Amino acid sequence: MPRTKAQVRALLAPTEHAEQRAVVAWARTMEPKWPELALLFAIPNQGRAGGRQGARWGARMAEEGLRAGLPDLMLPAARQRPLPQSGSFHGVFVEMKRSVGGQLSPAQKQWLGALEAAGYFCVVAPGAAVAIRALECYLALGPAPGQLGVGPAEEVAQPRQEPSPGHQRRERQRERHG
């Protein structure tokens, strides 16, 4: 059966799973720069498993509170909103899509709107490159008040890991040359 160029492109495009794996792999390598990326986690989606096992898994997950349309990734790291807005974002949700042909479901649109209204930064990312760029921009906004080691948050904050020797060496070089 003949296929159009668009159909062929869609077939050759990486899967949503592959795109999300690339984002998570990037996040793990960038933890020395942004330790908050250690908090990035995936939200399992009911639509990813098929067959009878998938139906059982979906029923169990629904009983545990999984909801259709939830975004794929969440980073619970607050950030200041860019000026002229005031306040802060509570964290960021990323809805991954294939770089070609991915579309939002009505449930996904509803969740993203509700999460934005609740103060979260939400991104629909058609491909890993878009998701990575969005996370870089979000993390560059800077910590929100309360994440600066002041106030009640410090009582429950876990100690941060020391940067790797290579990261420390690069920082010293920047200080000398910059």
Image (cartoon, grey):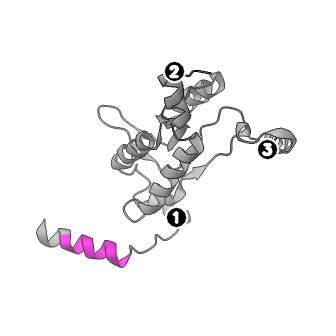
Marks 1 and 2, how far apart at CA: 54 Å
Question: In the rendered structure, are the residues bearing label 3 and label 2 in contact, judged by CB atoms less than 8 Å apart?
Answer: no
Q: Residues within 10 Å of mark 2 (few under 14, many from 20)?
A: few
Q: Is residue 26 left or right of residue 104?
A: left
Q: Is residue 86 left or right of residue 26?
A: left
Q: Residues within 10 Å of mark 3 (few under 14, many from 20)?
A: some
- The span picked out in magenta is 164-173
What residue did someone put label 2 on?
4
Q: At numbered mark 1, what does the secondary structure look like: helix, strand or loop?
A: loop
Q: Quadrant of residue 176?
A: bottom left
- Magenta span contains residue 71: no
What residue did someone put label 1 on?
157
What residue did someone put label 3 on?
61
Quadrant for the C terminus, please. Answer: bottom left
Q: Quadrant of residue 32?
A: bottom left
Q: Position of residue 150 (x, y in %)?
A: 42, 60
